Image (cartoon, rainbow, N blue to C red):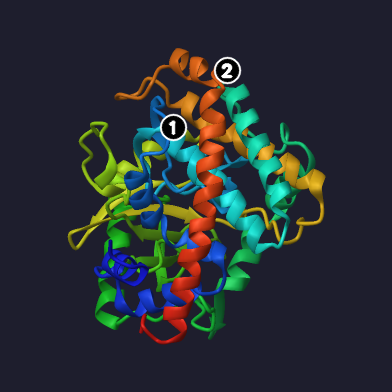
Amino acid sequence: MPGIYDRITAFNKNLLPDMVKLKYEAMAENIYRFYRGTCHLFYEDLNKADSLPPSPSTWICGDLHLENFGSYKADNRLVYFDLNDFDEAVLGPCIWEVARMITSIFIAFENLEIEEEKAVKMAQLYLKSYSATLTKGKAISIEPRTAKGIVCTFLIKANNRKQKELLKKRTTEKKHRLFLSLDHEKHFELDKPLKKELTRFINDWIETSSDGPYNFKVVDCVFRLAGTGSVGVKRYLFLLKSLNTKNKFLLLDMKQATRSSLQPYLSVNQPHWESEADRVIQIQQRMQNFSPALLGAIMFKGDSYVLQEMQPTEDSINFGVIKDQYRDIYMVIDDMALLTASSQLRSAGRQGSAIADKLIAYGLSTQWQDEVLNYSLKYARQVKQDYKQYLTGYKKGKYK
């Protein structure tokens, strides 16, 4: 079997080389970022292990972990806490989603130096709440009026953040005009021909698409770096200015969509999608209660992209801040379990996914819970070995 170096470099070989260097650097920071950046390893190993019992086929985001839950403002302008990353989304066994998430609990707690005993209890809580929600057969959503505890506080703060704050962090003023700041660590300057082409392309999209913001135009764009697993794909950030309202701006994110890393291991037939971006958006709209503003799919120079508004409310829970607050962690994990099950119930019966009755029956069963817990705990220990091997190679300069 190929080693970690060969497996990682083979997966990333078609991404942007300069950005992949930054991805490898990020993955070396700690074991949790390594886990986030190697979703493909998880499913390669899961496919070989054949250790999980059968489960109903559902729509899954595919890369569920603690930081893939977050807040965002939907088209109805309410702020929600929900699953928020669907790059890897497919129709697959629901137990895959659960195993990926529980493993992330063990990895994150290891990174935060929280004892394994507490991690096991949180994993058991997640399984219990996930199953109980399936059993009820009714999807729930979480927004400021329905949230509780620390998630409620988190959403209230997110709801109070203003667009001006986001613009202040991302932009700079020159000669009384606003531009995207190249001093921001996540912004990179574009070649002039590409920048001109992108500007013209998005302006055309605004004028011709019903999904675009009315009467805005592009005033600047940069290459944007974000996330861990997706570092290396093409991603751009646009500053849009209103033609009608003075000093009104929007930030628009344009992210390349590539094939899901789960695809090689799926035995379930997938629907035909117009593009990879179409896959991401359609599954996202099925699984979320409400989708983010300006969500759309476009093609640019032969690649498909997901467009959506970048908002001041988009954020994830910082477990490092609450690592000593057991009750807060308990409530967050409980909410994440409710949302995982709800996303599967909400999208039940769509194009091959199990109907709600099958998910209810699955929630009532118990044997699979110990099996997925044991697998995830064992696999988390494997990730520790893989990370150690990766870090050794990285420090020796192999990934340069």
Identify the residue shown where x is 76% and y is 56%: 323
Q: Residue 317, position in %: x, y?
A: 66, 53
Sequence-first tag of 2 and 1: 1
Between 199 and 273, the one nearer to me in the picture: 273
Within the image, what quadrant is residue 60 found in?
top left
Residue found at x 52% / y 45%:
376
Seen at 30% across and 67% down, the residue is 12
User: Quarter of the image holding residue 303?
Assistant: bottom left
Residue situated in front as seen by the camera: 162 or 85: 85
Residue corresponding to mark 2: 135
Q: Nearer the viewer, residue 163 or 9?
A: 9
User: Which amino acid is tagged 2?
Assistant: Thr
* Viewport quadrant of the N terminus: bottom left
Disc 1 marks a residue whose amino acid type is Cys
**Residues marked 2 and 1 touching at CB (< 8 Å):** no
User: Dot 2 lies on which element?
Assistant: helix
Q: Which residue is mark 1?
A: 94
Report whether residue 321 is seen: yes
